[in-house]
Amino acid sequence: MNANQIINIAMRLFGRRLINKGVTAGIDHFAKKNGAKNGPVSGQNAGDIAKKARQISRLMRRF
């Protein structure tokens, strides 16, 4: 294994983690899961929307 392959592996791992964190943060932000009670979506609906959004994002990653 040469240095180029090792660097590519490390970059893929780092990039995947970074993208996953970004997707999760975006879903949480738009679902107002962070405790905002006066947002357009709150309470039980926020959890349902966040769960569905995560499922959709997982499906999209498979494609």
Image (cartoon, rainbow, N blue to C red):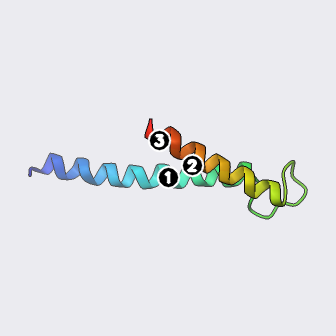
**In contact (CB < 8 Å): disc 1 and disc 3:** no
- Residue pushed farthest top? 63
Q: Which mark is residue 40?
A: none
Residue labelled with disc 3:
61
**In contact (CB < 8 Å): disc 2 and disc 1:** yes
- Residue pushed farthest left? 1
Residue labelled with disc 2:
23
Instruction: Out of 40 and 4, give the one closest to the viewer.
Output: 40
**In contact (CB < 8 Å): disc 3 and disc 2:** no
- Residue pushed farthest right? 38
At x 17% / y 47%, what residue is drawn? 5
* Dot 3: element: helix
- Specify few, some or many for label 1: CA neighbours under 10 Å numbering under 14, 14-19, or 20 or more: few
* Dot 2: element: helix
At x 13% / y 51%, what residue is drawn? 3
The Cα–Cα distance between marks 2 and 1, rounded to whole angstroms, is: 5 Å
Which is in the foreground here, disc 3 or disc 2? 3
Residue 34, image x and y in percent?
74, 62
Q: Which amino acid does label 3 sit on?
A: Arg
Q: Which amino acid does label 2 sit on?
A: Val
Residue 10, image x and y in percent?
28, 54
Q: Which amino acid does label 1 sit on?
A: Asn
Residue 1, image x and y in percent?
8, 52
Q: Sequence order check: which comes first, mark 3 or mark 2?
A: 2
At x 34% / y 54%, what residue is drawn? 13
- Specify few, some or many for label 2: CA neighbours under 10 Å numbering under 14, 14-19, or 20 or more: some
Q: Which image quarter holds the C terminus?
A: top left
Residue labelled with disc 1:
20
Relative to residue 18, is residue 55 drawn left or right?
Answer: right
Is the residue 60 above or below the residue 19 in the image? Answer: above
